[in-house]
Amino acid sequence: MRKSPMKKDKNRNNIMAKDPILAKHNKTEKLIKSKNIKDQLFYLFGFLILVAASFILFALISDLFIRGASRLNFDFLTHFPSRKPEAAGILSAWVGSLAVMLVTSSVSLVLGVMTGIYLEEYAPKNIFTFLIELAIVNMAGIPSITFGLMALGIFVYQFNFGQSILTAGLTLGLLVLPIIIVTTREALKSIPNHLREAAYSLGASKYQIVRDHLLPYSSGGILTGMILALSRAVGETAPLITIGALTFIAFLPTPPIQSTPPFVSFEWLWDGFTVLPIQMFNWVSRPQEEFHINAAATGAILLMLTLILNAGAIWLRYKFRKRYHW
Amino acid sequence: MANGNSSIISGYDEKRLAHVKRRESWVAFILFLASLSTLLTVFSIIVILVTESLPFFKTVSIIDFLTQKEWTPLFDQAQYGILPLISGTLTTTWVAMLIALPSGIIIAAYLSEFIRPSLREIIKPLLEIFAAIPTVVYGYFALLFVTPVLQKFFPELPGFNMFSAGIVMGFMIIPYVSSLVEDAMRSVSKEVREASFALGASKLETTFKVVLPAASSGIIAALILSISRALGETMIVAIAAGMQPQIAFSPFQAAQTLTAFIVQVSLGDAPHGSIGYQSIYVAGLTLFCMTLILNLIGFYFRKQAQSK
Amino acid sequence: MGLLVNEPNAVKAIKADVKNFNFYYGQKQAVKDVNFSVYQNKVTALIGPSGCGKSTLLRSLNRIHDLYKGFKTEGEVILHPEQINILDKSIDPTFVRMRVGMVFQKPNPFPKSIYENVVYGLKIRGLKKRALLEQKCEESLKAAGLWDEVKDRLDQLATGLSGGQQQRLCIARALAVEPDLLLLDEPTSALDPISTSVIEDLVIELKNKVTILIVTHNLQQAARCSDFTAFMYLGELIEFGETNKLFTKPQNVKTENYITGRFG
């Protein structure tokens, strides 16, 4: 279609040159043509930028996997760090990450969901609510390392929690709190008001509505937020370095289940720890090439972990979008 | 109507009603307390940064702090001029913005005006992967991938340099910029676009001459908020930009940022109350003030963009 | 203005009295000085052109407005025989809603199973015995004329039912808690004609069990299934009386104009 006016038709061009109206029309046609080409060019340009971005992403991921390939095996997961790079592993790091995430998710889930519910369903319009909202917006913009400084001053030295899993979990929990609050609020907002009215009209109280309706219907959204928050927290390094997380740990936290009564122990909360990103940072900072291989392998694992968490969040969002049609 | 359990069913049970009412007020109170955690966090951050920095300014005068050109708080001959750290922070930031802002705006324009919404739903999560990658992995990438590649073209580039760190940081920030700009572009009303198309403007002209200027508040917000994010970025610069505090405005050399300094001191031994301990709070406070001001301005512009 | 009232000829038990009812949205008065009685085990219809305040009045009886801000009510709605004023701010809205049920314009079942929908009102009143809940569920679904259609799939999602079935489920849900007064807010406005006639038959049948106040924009519906009718216009109650009298011999010229289709 577009090609037809482009045809070099001498006859036609001659006629056009003579007739002023047709000449103007011809000029317009040329202008449109050039505009169309520019539009197409930009379309191509945007596409190329996306291709380039994907290429960079791909380069990053493959670099990690290729360089770290020799260390990506079971032994790497079951060994403690060591002075000898080829004998070193990430056992204490992944166990530490797991323990810290456990604390982080409980803290941020409880506080975040409660705050989300409060702001969306309970909060009166007053100065206090305004301040809380302002705090949440600002929290999301505060550099993460500042949370580490706060935790060092308060959790480590004021509360004497030490440089422990508990301190780390609390710090990251507060750091990702805004993510959970925002997703909780969005999930609650998407529940249509007529369902609240239906429950109220039957005599339900606000708490019963939250418990029986709002929480179940928003659980998908909250879960998505939780996973995104964890994916952020698992890669956070700076605040944990600031609170004084150790970079070389050759022991595991106290097991939560003991052979003697009372069988369950929370001693591990007070133990020192390291996490995957700190272990990786430690190895990247070494001058020796061999440690860089370990760093690449750790990075590959860390990257897989965040990608899986993000994919999970996208999948959940999609699944829950389909589940409820009000 | 009247039957055996009508009293329960119609809710006449005063005791039960009173119990429900009591529980209601307890729940509301507990939820309120939980939401105070956010306020308390921000408050604690400000208080702790200020109180832990104050002793520092008893030994160092504010004028020296702001004007001296050397930062060596851990040396015997200690110097306490913050300028080197600020120069490092600003240099990595502008390199990052040089990458992130144009690409972010072009991607936003492309996503919001040029492609089908169904395709956009696929591309956006892909872009978000950029923001989801841990910063320590980006630091690795800057030090062990970008710098060696750049050294092939510029052999004199040092192993630690702010250029690689800034470039990689820019990539990390692209999705943040593009989503802020895209939001602003989408809030430009359909009528504005239609008016432009009705005059015979092409898609490209409409996008860049009409929609983007109309979304200028959103773009300013994106610029400011992403600068704030770049200022506070830690791991990339701590790994790849080097650890020497020096006044440096060329990105092709090594220098330390405020955040990298905090990391350096935290890795070593800085006992509670020592000058080293105080100095990381001073660096933190400086950073916090810079980002807070930018955030507040950014939020203002974002509100403006949304209310249009 | 003169309020014309067709006095009912026989003395009947009164379930609720609306006395000097005024309603304000901010500064704007939506309902002006309305007085009428709702008779026990009868169907009372509220009719009038849209925006006349009939839905506002109905929602006030369930204190639904309490969920939102920026409104004010004046006057009383006395619920008999206890003689409590359900508009009184000192009375807990939950208490009112436990006695006054409501069905909304758009069917709004919870995205839960059919069974869970019907027994929800009972559960929040503290009833836990499974056998009793199941018995009540069956009774209510039968009363709402839905039992035969859903008895084999009580555990399926209620949102999978058709619009008409959903609305009958909402009626069953409201009936399960045996309300003193059942409010229906244009219950058929979102439904097809067949579902509408099923619900109209249901309303006539249900008045043996419960007193019904129904808002409708459909005059035929009011004529077919109500015993008393109140005509409202611009926030005022123009005429109230027995349905057959109001429709055959309206006392007010506005009522006559409305029911003969000259406006509205």
Image: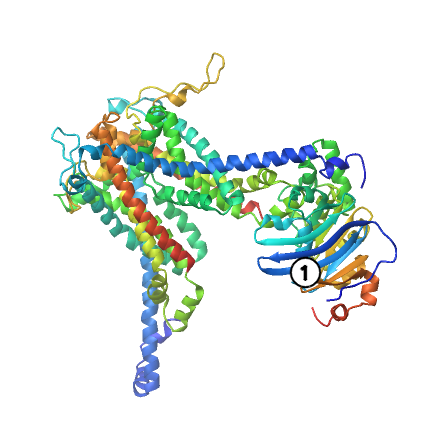
Q: Nearer the viewer, residue C234 or A316?
A: C234
Q: Residue at x 69, y 53 (%)?
A: C75
Quadrant the C terminus of chain C occupies: bottom right
Residue tagged 1? C32
Quadrant the N terminus of chain C occupies: bottom right
Tally the numbered discs: 1
Residue type at tag 1: Lys
Coordinates of residue A80 in the picture (x, y in percent): 31, 21
Residue C115: quadrant of the picture? top right
Determine if residue A27 is in view. Answer: yes
Name the secondary structure under disc 1. strand
Label 1 marks a residue whose chain is: C
Q: Residue furthest right?
A: C10
Coordinates of residue A192 in the picture (x, y in percent): 57, 49
Against B223, residue A277 (above or below) is above
Q: Nearer the viewer, residue B147 or C216?
A: C216
Q: Is residue B118 left or right of residue C52?
A: left
